Image (tube, rainbow, N blue to C red):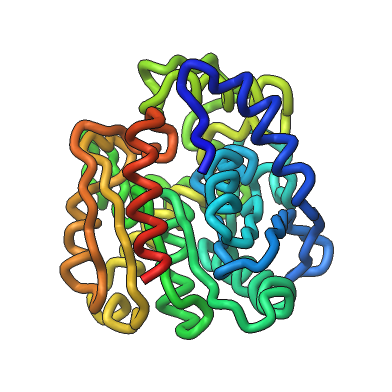
Amino acid sequence: MHWIADEQFEEQMRTVAEPYLAERREAGFDERVPGEPIYYEHYRVDNPKAVVVVSHGFTESIVKHAENIYYLLQAGYEVWGLDHRGHGRSFRANENPYVVYVRRFKDYVFDLDHLTETKIVPAAKGLPLYLYCHSMGGNIGVRMLELFPGRYQKAVLSSPMLGLSFGKIPLGAALAVASVRSIGPGGKQPMSPVSAMPEETFEASAANSEPRFRWYYEKKLADPRLQTCAASTSWGREAILACGLASQRSKIARIQVPILLFQAGNDTFVENRAQDEFASFAPDCTMQKMPGLRHELFFSDTETLKQYWGQIFEFYEK
């Protein structure tokens, strides 16, 4: 396994990892809904052990997970990933390029299920399918496991969005405001006005590694498709409701596959309490707590990533 060093991160991504990925990448679009193309990427390896599907977080894209894919491929896993609707190169239903809009959160789940059934399963040729999900992608992954049992055999949830943090604002009040403001055309409007991608700093980010934060920030500055940075009122309403659905004890009990859940000890984006409750209700869930780390665990220093990915590979290979 070649690990990308912190002090040489940008150079090694540019000269080693990205060329390696480009040689193995096939890309295309999948249309569950005619006229609403969802961008996907497929990475091949010789004699794969299994297939891992990457489900990214809010305002992200599959581009952000390039280092993750690099490690998965080296470990012998074929990889698929997608830009969820409203993100990256996938279909957007609103005109403001900085705002993520979704009419129903289930559309994310149905998009992933359609890609799984029409593209991933036929290409896998009987190999087991595993999930790797971050944040919002974790909620999507959980709903997949609840609604479509049997599609996937294992799932890794990294800082999954099972409960949202609104600081001092009560959840009920946040839902009420988002619900009222999302009526009709207001659903595509941002929760707060936005007309450009704001300047970002490592100190205020969700990342734990400054070189990794800087690498993706430069990617965003160079590509307008990666500059989504705000929630629409509809997304806010749907995300709150989706967290409630994913965390219902009766729905969690339907999940019959092993789950490895990573929790960031210093997470200010999602509620760790909701993750604790999910882990206690799920039939087969192992919790790995990462004290002192922020939300984006996969954007940590190299030594931390060796432990993080070591646990993931051990889980996948059991």
Q: In x, y percent, where is residue 66?
A: 60, 40
Looking at the image, which residue is at 70% across and 55% down? 43
Q: Is residue 190 above or below residue 94?
A: above
Near-viewer residue (105 or 132): 132
Q: Is residue 209 above or below residue 38?
A: above
Residue 103 appears in view: yes
Looking at the image, which residue is at 48% across and 85% down? 150
Residue 59 appears in view: no
Q: In x, y percent, where is residue 215?
A: 58, 23
| Position of residue 13 in the picture relative to residue 201 (left or right) | right
Q: In x, y percent, where is residue 73?
A: 60, 53
Q: Quadrant of the rendered structure where residue 207 is? A: top left
Q: Is residue 232 above or below residue 116?
A: above
Q: Quadrant of the rendered structure where residue 266 is? A: top left
Looking at the image, which residue is at 21% across and 65% down? 279
| Position of residue 200 in the picture relative to residue 102 (left or right) | left
Looking at the image, which residue is at 64% across and 30% down? 227
Total marks shown come to 0
Near-viewer residue (262 or 3): 3
Q: Quadrant of the rendered structure where residue 259 is? A: bottom left
| Position of residue 260 in the picture relative to residue 235 (left or right) | left
Quadrant (top left/top right/bottom left/bottom right) for the C terminus: bottom left
Q: In x, y percent, where is residue 29?
A: 80, 59
